[in-house]
Image (cartoon, grey):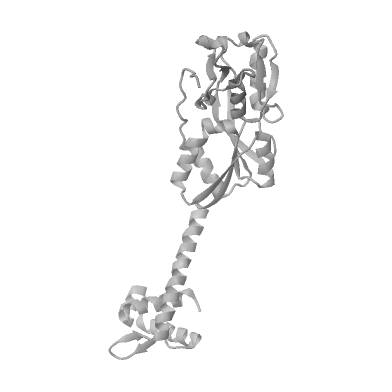
């Protein structure tokens, strides 16, 4: 039995007329009659009562019709799902991201992706850069938002966002009265930093900025999440130099200030494995052409 036999049967059951059914199928009437007889022989039961004046479904044919329609409907759905998966519009996508990405590129990209590929299930996992590199190689995520640099012959990457640095101060700090803060005025401060081992692409520009101002920062505390760093600043544990988009994270007790000097830029990059799936390719297309950064106030604000 072939699928075309089922289609012939369904069309004839809908028309109950061999001539009209043959016309819909774009075949001659005698081959259609022959195909239906062969199907009945293979099934072992009669599908139609035939007279010179009419064609009528048997009781067995009526029951068989319902199941055949279900089969062809499921087949159409399977074909559509396969086509969507081929276009990267169906399936499951596991996305890793550093916490700071949630305050710039991540929300608009996710909105665009969900709007254009609503049948793809997204699984999000907040991870440090080194964790994402490991998870990507292990196949535990499909794509990631990380702080460069990225090393590894099996990993591809592209920078999608660059931004300057600002300083986060406790609201009681004397420097909060200034419009812009000179980096050198922070030389006696205790700093809260992200560990270098987890994100050298963020740690190194901060250290470089301080050294250009004539000092090495005194590190009082390290934290692996940006939210934690800002919370420690609010607790007056120290100050922090952070990416400018972090001012989107408003936290009571924290004031963000721009720095007087031109700062190094810090980057965010997308990473993925070689030979990406169609869904990953679709995500990369949307990320590269359809996102716009959420607005960040030009003047840093108090949280």
Q: In the rendered image, is residue 296 in sight?
A: yes
Residue ranking furthest to the bottom: 51
**Is residue 23 placed above or below 148 in the rendered structure?**
below
Rendered location of residue 50, percent (x, y) = 34, 89
Residue occupying image coordinates x 29% and y 91%: 52
Q: Quadrant of residue 6?
A: bottom left
Residue occupying image coordinates x 49% and y 76%: 2
Residue occupying image coordinates x 65% and y 39%: 132
Q: Quadrant of residue 260?
A: top right
Residue ranking furthest to the left: 53
Which residue is nearer to you in this view: 284 or 205?
A: 205
Which residue is nearer to you in this view: 56 or 11?
A: 56
Residue ranking furthest to the right: 197
Rendered location of residue 286, percent (x, y) = 49, 40
**Is residue 236 placed above or below 278 in the rendered structure?**
above
Rendered location of residue 26, percent (x, y) = 36, 74
**Is residue 158 placed above or below 85 in the rendered structure?**
above
């Amino acid at each position: 039995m072939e699928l075309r036999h089922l289609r012939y049967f369904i069309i004839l059951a809908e028309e109950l007329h061999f001539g009209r059914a043959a016309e819909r199928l774009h075949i001659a009437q005698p081959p259609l009659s022959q195909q239906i007889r062969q199907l009945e022989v293979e099934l072992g039961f009669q599908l139609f009562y035939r007279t010179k004046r009419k064609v009528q479904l048997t009781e067995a044919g009526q029951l068989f019709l319902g199941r055949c329609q279900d089969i062809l409907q499921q087949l159409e759905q399977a074909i559509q799902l396969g086509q969507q998966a081929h276009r990267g519009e169906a399936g499951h996508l596991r996305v890793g991201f550093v916490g700071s990405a949630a305050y710039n590129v991540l929300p608009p990209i996710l909105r665009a992706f969900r709007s254009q590929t609503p049948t793809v299930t997204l699984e999000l996992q907040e991870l440090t850069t080194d964790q994402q590199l490991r998870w990507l190689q292990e196949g535990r995520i499909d794509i990631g938002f990380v702080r460069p640099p990225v090393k590894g012959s099996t990993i591809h990457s592209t920078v999608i966002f660059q931004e300057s640095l600002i300083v986060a101060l406790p609201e009681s700090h004397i420097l909060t009265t200034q419009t812009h803060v000179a980096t050198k005025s922070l030389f006696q401060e205790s700093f809260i930093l992200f560990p270098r081992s987890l994100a050298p692409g963020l740690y190194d520009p901060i250290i470089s900025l301080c050294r250009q101002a004539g000092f090495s920062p005194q590190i009082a505390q390290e934290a692996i999440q940006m939210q934690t760093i800002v919370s420690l600043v609010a607790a007056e544990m120290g100050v922090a130099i952070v990416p400018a988009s972090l001012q989107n994270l408003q936290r009571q007790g924290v004031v963000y200030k721009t720095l007087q000097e031109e700062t190094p830029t810090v980057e965010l990059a997308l990473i993925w494995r070689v030979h990406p799936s169609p869904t990953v390719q679709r995500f990369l297309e949307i990320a590269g052409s359809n996102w716009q950064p959420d607005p960040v106030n030009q003047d840093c604000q108090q949280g």
